[in-house]
Structures are given as structure tokens and as C-alpha cells.
Image: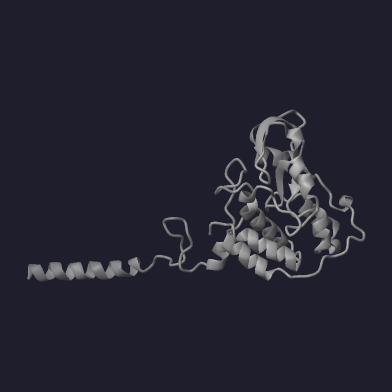
Amino acid sequence: MVRQIRVAGAVLAASLLLPLAGCSNPAAPGADGGAGNGADPKASASRAAPPGRDGKPSGGDVLPGMVTAAVARTQLAALEVAPVGTMAGYSRDKFTHWAQQGSNCDTREVVLERDGTDVKRDAQCRAVSGAWKSLYDGVAVTDAAKMDIDHMVPLAEGWRSGAAGWDAAKRKAFANDLARPQLLAVTAASNRSKGDQSPDLWQPPDKSSWCQYGRAWTTVKSAYGLTVTEPEKKMLTTMLDTCAS
């Protein structure tokens, strides 16, 4: 009789625990921080890696806001293909840059600090020392004066592919975008060689940068709803094909 009471008590305890075990949220993040069963896999895939505490990109990329090659291919496929637009009415002055970012710093100085190593600034926020490696040509530089801040999608190229119809505020945002892979510090020589050319007309001489370049260009054009030409799209596909995955 005593044994029967104990068995019944054990059964009762198990029956009380079973509902609790089923109360876990199937959509909650797993132990690795990934999305659970209730998450949208497309949304997870398109999410860019967050920057580190120092504001620098994580995951081996030089640029912030980067997406995977697979996501970039999806973005590229969705871009509208159109002929090259007109340059009528274009002026760099219509894209306000460099904007003030606080603490006497403008966008240029913020990018120089972000993209460099051991960067020291003076009271006016100008980089007075540091080291940089230019993504486009792989050149190492220790003089900030020899570095340009490149617009991944040049302002003139933006104008030709849709920015001509934007208001001043959107153009300013495009010219000073620190969240997406639109701005980076590169050698003045490589930046001026690129000019305002699209990927079908100019490619970074260091081919190891093509994967990042193709993903960055595609991401920026996708974020701002800009168009691409057929040759541009073909070259971007070639660049994305150099990615490891």
C-alpha cells in the first residue's frame, strides 16, 4: 500500500512537469544566439554583422554594413536594370559632404579613424598619425594626407542611376552614410583612378578585394533603390563569384 502511494505521487509530479517542459518559446534564440523556429530566415540572412566596440566592421570585412555573398546576389537580382542616366543638372555641391559628426569631427575624419590602426587626432579632429591599408590596391600608408575617402557608389554614378530625383536631405545622407558600405579610406591614387566609373568600367587592381567591392556596391545600390546597367550587373556577378561562399 505504501508502494502504491509513492508511485501515484511520482506520476502526479511527472504530470505537473510535462506542461512546464512544453512552455519554452519555439521562436526564442538558441544557445548560439541564432534565430529559433519562429524567426524569418530571410530576415536573418540579410542582417549585416554589427560593428565591434571600436566602430570597426567585424567578420574580416573592411567596410561596415556588409551582407553575405548570397544576400548580395539576391539584392543584385532585384535591382532594376536601366540605361545610363543623364548627367544634366549634376553638381557635387548637391550632395552635402562632409557633414559634421560631433566633437569637431566631420565624416572624413570619422572614416579615417574607423579604417585606420592606432590613429591619433589633434584638437581639430585631424588624423596626425596612424596606419591604413587601402582595399583597392593593397598599399600600406602612414600619412593620412595620402588617403582619400571614396564613395563606393560615386556621387555622379548615384545621380545617373536615380539620385537626380532625390531631395537634398537624401543626397546628404547618401554622401555621408557611415552605416552602410558606402565610404572607405583608400589611396588617393586608386580613388582618382576609379573616378565616377561603375564596376564594368573600373575594377580594383587588387583582385582579392573584388568580393568585398561587389557586395558593397550591390548593397548600397539596393539600399538606395538605384538602377544598374546590364554591363554593370554582369561585372558585379563576376565579382560576387570570387567570394568563397
Locate residue 219 relative to residue 169 in the image: left or right: left
Tally of numbered tags: 0
By what rule are the colours in the image chosen? one colour
Locate residue 6 relative to residue 106 in the image: left or right: left
* Residue shown at 47% from the left, 59% from the top: 34
Q: Whole-percent x and y of residue 182?
A: 71, 52
When the figure is inspected, residue 137 is found, relative to residue 236, above or below; the finding is above
Quadrant where the N terminus sits is bottom left
Is 171 in front, or is 133?
Answer: 133
Question: Could you tell me if residue 22 is visible in this image?
Answer: yes
Q: Residue furthest left?
A: 1
When the figure is inspected, residue 79 is found, relative to residue 131, above or below; the finding is below
* Residue shown at 60% from the left, 57% from the top: 67
Q: Residue furthest right?
A: 89
Q: Quadrant of residue 14?
A: bottom left
Q: Whole-percent x and y of residue 111?
A: 70, 42
Question: Could you tell me if residue 120 is visible in this image?
Answer: no
* Residue shown at 92% from the left, 61% from the top: 88
Is 22 in front, or is 98?
Answer: 98
* Residue shown at 29% from the left, 66% from the top: 17
